[in-house]
Image (tube, grey):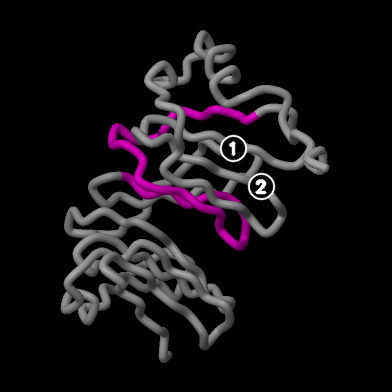
Amino acid sequence: GGMLWTAAVQETVDATLNRTLSSGISGASYYTGQFSSVKRSAEGKYVAVSSRGNFYMTWEPGQTYWQPHNRTSARRLQDMGWRPQGGLWLATRGGDLYFNTNEADLEDFKQVNFGSRGFGILDVGYQPNGTLWAAGGSGTLYKSSNRGNSWSRIKGGDKVPGNFYAVKFMSEKQGYILGNAGILLRYIG
């Protein structure tokens, strides 16, 4: 009965980090055995952020090991995810946002002119039409209709007493924001 699963990688995350420590992955020696975030792309690729925010790892189908990466900023990583048009988004503790547009180099990021007022961004969600929504601490909510080139703050979020943790869109008109203390916002576009 219980032999229905097979490993997709050939070694544990701990073993990968121990093997690659000499290759210069900063903070890997502080790995505590957990990730604060793991996100999956539509193609089955994964990105995982270390719980301390000092490095991240990627894996895609066909790879035999997780690939460790240094963070691109002096600030620790808050969260990361996959962009629908390819590449990654990266949010740091302190509110910086970065985009990667080169899937061949998952360490090449460009900072986005964002202006988060120091509040951390905890998730970035995408509507099917390409509109981006960035949500975070203290009801922080931002919207971009031009692929992240410019952002506008949605001030209504400031009236919600809590943090926004996840932004998800099922369709153009159906989206939700999940926050702490049972906060659930529905997009009414």
Residue drawn at x 73%, y 24% as measured from the top left: 10
Q: Is 70 inside the magenta-drawn segment?
A: yes
Q: Which residue is mark 2?
A: 45
The correct choice, above or below, for 97 with respect to 57 in the image is below
The residue tagged with tag 2: helix, strand or loop?
loop
The correct choice, above or below, for 111 with respect to 57 in the image is below
Could you tell which of marks 2 and 1 lies nearer the N-terminus? 2
Q: Is 80 inside the magenta-drawn segment?
A: yes
**Callout 1 crowding tier (Cα within 10 Å): few <14, some 14–19, many ≥20:** some
For the record, the magenta segment spans 66-92
In percent of width and height, residue 15 lies at: 59, 17
**Callout 2 crowding tier (Cα within 10 Å): few <14, some 14–19, many ≥20:** some
Numbered tag placed on residue 113 in the rendering: none
Q: Quarter of the image holding residue 123? A: bottom left
Q: Is residue 165 left or right of residue 174?
A: left
The residue tagged with tag 1: helix, strand or loop?
strand
| Amino acid found under the numbered disc labelled 1 | Thr
Residue drawn at x 20%, y 76% as measured from the top left: 160
Numbered tag placed on residue 58 in the rendering: 1
| Amino acid found under the numbered disc labelled 2 | Lys
| Badge 2 vs badge 1, beta-carbon distance below 8 Å | yes
